[in-house]
């Protein structure tokens, strides 16, 4: 038997979650950036040498480093510097407008005011702000505010003028520009916002790197060690990819990052493919992941493409961003080039369009382990779930949407459809690996509301929505670790704590299996985050 080296670090005397199949140990030894061994403290004791750092878990749970399978890391870092108008900070229209007016008083005339996170359902007026109200709050500045879902926005008159949007502007395919009695309200959806996005000033190269570092450190504070940035290239292919490379080269990339490349009509795939950036390129810190295609919007904004109309609006069943022919062509092209796909599809009609396109691509070029993904995958039928399992297509949901938006779903959808949303239990039963994620900055990267909802299926108001889809704590941890690694094609070296796998570990402030969901939501934190055997985050005492 070959003698093992002395460990660099040992964590012991607490539950150590190895993986859903492997269960728990009570000690883990780390060496040279990898897991050296797991077992009991007595079994690990011979691996402790004079230089070994020994951490007493004292009953706290240690897990593999969490894998955030779908967020927008760079945009998260940028929006952390924008005006935060989420419901946790403002729930009245007057309060929102006051925040914008205050920011206008702080900036120069003509400087853009960007804000994100409002939810009309949570505002006292139960509607979107109007462009004229934004005009009064900031008469000398272009204003652009984004709804929490990221698929609807409101601009004031100055912003619309700069973008060249008038009452005569044609509505683009896959988009919306709202007019009431022929007048612009400022509300836009999906592709209708492209002219505004084109004129918002770009951040500098240094600001992009700062954003990556800022958001990555924030993720570390929750035990997150790996992420997929779900749409790299929204602003610029070269500048965004270069920012990630600069962050890695200069030691400012706090999380292992899989870059999901933006596809579609305004995407970067042609440039990436020409430069050799295909799925799997890169290393264990910065790699190329799937290609992103948008097919619809959000349920809360009534833009997710559904097979049945929204509640109370028989004329509204959502928006398709692409025709069937366009979706089929893009999917087949990217699949043939060897890319994994990560398709944004929330409504069941959009999911059906996506499955049809993916199956056609797989028929053309069979690849049983391509592992295409449906991002969000909010509202699907049992037949669609069975089809996903047969084709090897994985869901990448955000259970936290139920926490943040569940009550809104009940106002725009019938109870049955709302209850069947994000069916974590059904997916797992079907043999799929639904990877938990937040879609930050749509929702906060804070893991605890996500964990709470997976355990309880409760919204932030306590409404139970599809209680039969609740998971056990072990399944929840797997959804945030092993499943995340699997859908990002890195399950052989991340996501579980087994010898030879990455020494990425999260330590929480209690035994997670002995806490109530409410205690996890309100009274639990990440104490330590370890990447490659090095401590990268430690909570204040």
Image (cartoon, rainbow, N blue to C red):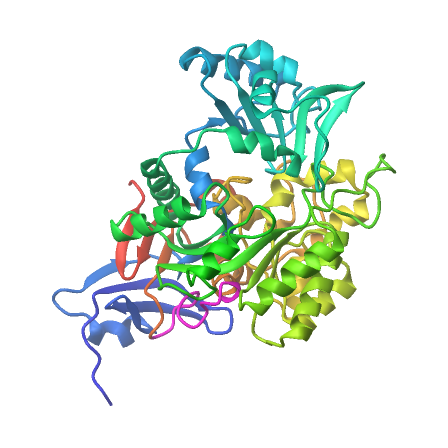
Depth order, front residue of 361/162: 162
Q: Position of residue 116 (x, y in %)?
A: 53, 30
Q: Nearer the viewer, residue 316 or 331?
A: 331
Indicate left or right for 355 with 396 as reference: right
Q: Is residue 124 above or below residue 324?
A: above
Q: Nearer the viewer, residue 323 or 164?
A: 164
- In this view, 453 is above or below 139: below
Quarter of the picture holding the N terminus: bottom left
Q: Is residue 117 visible?
A: no
Q: Magenta segment: does it hold 460? A: no
The residues colored magenta run 486-499
Instruction: Give the residue displayed 67% in from the left and 20% down from the top.
Output: 124
| Residue lying at 70% horizontally and 21% vertically, measured from the top left | 185
| Left or right of 184, for residue 74 | left
> Residue sitting at 39 percent across and 44 percent down?
239
- Residue at the location (59% across, 46% down)? 400
Q: Quadrant of residue 363?
A: bottom right
């Amino acid at each position: 038997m070959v003698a093992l080296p002395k460990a660099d670090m040992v964590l012991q005397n607490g539950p150590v979650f190895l993986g859903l199949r492997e269960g728990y140990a009570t000690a883990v030894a780390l060496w040279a950036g990898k897991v050296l061994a797991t077992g009991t403290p007595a079994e690990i004791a011979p691996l402790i040498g004079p230089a070994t750092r020994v951490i007493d878990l004292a009953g706290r749970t240690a897990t593999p480093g969490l894998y955030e399978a779908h967020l927008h890391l760079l945009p998260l870092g940028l929006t952390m510097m924008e005006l935060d108008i989420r419901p946790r900070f403002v729930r009245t229209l007057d309060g929102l407008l006051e925040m914008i007016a205050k920011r206008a008083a702080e900036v120069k005339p003509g400087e853009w005011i960007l804000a994100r996170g409002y939810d009309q359902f949570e505002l006292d007026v139960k509607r979107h702000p109007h462009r004229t109200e934004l005009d009064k709050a900031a008469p000398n500045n272009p204003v652009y505010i984004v709804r929490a879902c990221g698929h609807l926005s409101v601009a004031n008159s100055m912003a619309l003028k700069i973008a060249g949007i008038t009452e005569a502007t044609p509505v683009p395919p896959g988009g919306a520009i709202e007019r009431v009695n022929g007048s612009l309200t400022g509300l836009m959806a999906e592709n209708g916002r492209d002219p505004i996005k084109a004129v918002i000033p770009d951040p500098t190269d240094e600001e992009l790197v700062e954003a990556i570092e800022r958001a990555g450190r924030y993720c570390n504070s929750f035990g997150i060690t790996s992420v997929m940035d779900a749409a790299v290239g929204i602003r610029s292919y070269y500048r965004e990819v270069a920012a990630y490379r600069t962050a890695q080269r200069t030691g400012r990339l706090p999380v292992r990052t899989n870059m999901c490349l933006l596809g579609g009509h305004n995407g970067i795939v042609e440039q990436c493919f020409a430069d050799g950036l295909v799925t799997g390129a890169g290393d264990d810190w910065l790699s190329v992941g799937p290609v992103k295609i948008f097919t619809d919007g959000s349920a809360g904004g009534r833009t997710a493409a559904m097979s049945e109309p929204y509640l109370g609006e028989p004329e509204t069943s959502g928006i398709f961003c692409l025709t069937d022919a366009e979706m089929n062509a893009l999917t087949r092209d990217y699949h043939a080039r060897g890319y994994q796909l990560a398709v944004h599809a929330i409504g069941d009609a959009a999911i059906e369009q996506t499955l049809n396109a993916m199956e056609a691509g797989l028929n053309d070029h069979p690849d049983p382990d391509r592992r295409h993904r449906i991002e969000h995958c909010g509202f699907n039928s049992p037949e669609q779930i069975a089809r996903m399992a047969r084709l090897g297509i994985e869901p990448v949901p955000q259970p936290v949407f139920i926490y943040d938006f569940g009550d809104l779903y009940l106002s725009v959808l019938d109870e049955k459809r709302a209850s069947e949303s994000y069916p974590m239990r059904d997916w797992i039963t079907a043999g799929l690996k639904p990877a938990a994620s937040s879609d930050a900055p749509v929702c906060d990267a804070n893991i605890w509301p996500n964990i709470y909802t997976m355990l309880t299926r409760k919204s932030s108001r306590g409404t139970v929505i599809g209680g039969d889809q609740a998971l056990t704590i072990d399944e929840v941890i797997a959804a945030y670790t092993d499943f995340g690694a699997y859908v990002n094609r890195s399950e052989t070296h991340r996501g579980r704590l087994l010898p030879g796998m990455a020494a990425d570990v999260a330590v929480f402030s209690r035994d997670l299996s002995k806490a109530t969901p409410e205690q996890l939501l309100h009274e639990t934190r990440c104490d330590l985050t370890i990447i490659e055997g090095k401590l990268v985050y430690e909570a204040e005492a």
